[in-house]
Image (tube, rainbow, N blue to C red):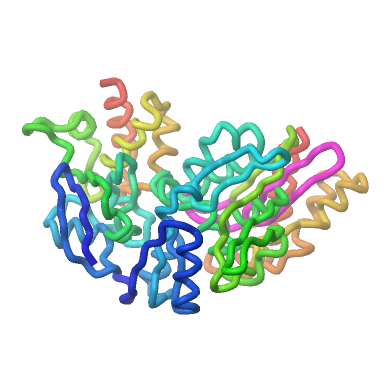
Amino acid sequence: MIPAAFDYKRASSAAEAISLVGQYGDEAKFLAGGHSLIPLMKLRLAQPAMLIDIGRIKDLSYIKDGGDFIAIGALTRHMDVEKSALVLKEVPLLAHAAGYVGDAQVRHRGTIGGSLAHADSASDLPATTLALGATYVVQGPKGERLMAAADFYKGFLESALQPDEMLTEIRVPKMNGAKWGFEKFNRRAQDWAIVGVAAWRSKDASGVALVNMGSTPILATSVSAALKSGASVADAAQLASNEAEPQDDLNASSEYRVHLAKVLVRRALEKASA
Amino acid sequence: MKVSITVNGTRQEKDVEPRTLLVHFLRDRLQLTGTNIGCDTSSCGACTIHLDGEAVKSCTMLAAQADGGKVTTIEGLSKDGVMHPMQQAFMENHGLQCGYCTPGMVMASIGLLKENPNPTEEEVRLGLEGNLCRCTGYHNIVKSVLAAAKK
């Protein structure tokens, strides 16, 4: 399969990328690792007239300690997130989830920012960063703005990014030793989750988010509210799909997804409560 | 556009369309047909090559993204007619049946041992999750990788 023809430009900085995308507007797409975009282009589900390759912007590939949070450059590859000692120590849930994206070859190329900006509710990292209460740093022609992960996802493959904006950094609050669970139910090892759950729990708070339970990643706020008011894990997990609107597809009916979400939320929370 | 990619030690400068996939560049422009196209959807791993020392799927990359990089394909593994230890291990352990997935399996396995030189059987199976064998010959593939790790 061969993508439709397009023009190609390479940006060497975020500022250059934003200026380029400003010139080409809606016709242009950013290319990071390409592991979400190129498959869509090969299937001709995406046909951008201009690709702006941001994959070589070296200064957007980093993992830093930001005090209360870990700052991850948008072009940091999944493999680097997965293996980072800092991420493993401070946000182990994210390191674990990054290690379940695709397969080793995909993780060598795919980037965290690319995965989040692609805004696929079936991907693991949007839900994981949502559960962790991450903040995204977005750069546009007028400067930088911060966006909560909870405000970022607008619809199927649709984010709050404007066409001339670029996701540059992901700030993930440190877990401070909170326990966590990550459940991914799929038929084959490397598939997208039919349903996935990222969850963490500390003494007085929790975060639970669902993969592939709607057109966006879903924050299961009812579950966290129930836990806070003293419900057992088993009872709270029954509320797993309160905020979700799961679809039917080849892999599962929406009813089955609701069932899976309850079971997987319970399992994830049991691990996070052990 | 012009790209310059060092493939198996030889610098290759070619004019390509931006949409040229790396696997097509290797197979059609350089006639390096050892790298196979299987699923063409980044699932099966038959097209696995090394870019700057890391296993990647060449059907899901543009040649433009590899511009300036170093690529190794299955053709670049043997030295002076002597097979790479991984190729040798696949041969000795019957790590192939029809052979279609083999170039990708060998490249992915070399990448795996580079990152984890002494894997357990489970780690080999997990590490090769991105490569499918339609003959379902996984058992001997895993055996081959474990044998190569001991060499």
- To which quarter of the image does residue A204 belong? top right
Q: Nearest the camera: B139 or A94?
A: A94
Q: Position of residue B151 (x, y in %)?
A: 25, 21
Q: Nearest the camera: A95 or A172?
A: A172
In this orientation, does residue A197 appear? yes
- Image point (17%, 37%), residue name: B77
Q: Is residue B53 left or right of residue A195?
A: left
Q: Is residue B126 left or right of residue A72?
A: left
- Image point (78%, 41%), residue name: A201
Q: Position of residue B37 (x, y in %)?
A: 25, 58
Q: Position of residue A127 (x, y in %)?
A: 65, 55
Q: Quadrant of the N terminus of chain B?
A: bottom left
- Image point (33%, 36%), residue name: B139
Q: Nearest the camera: B120 or A216?
A: A216
Residue A172 vertical position relative to residue A256 in the rendered view, above or below: above
- Image point (54%, 55%), residue name: A113
What's drawn in magenta, residue-wise?
A185-210
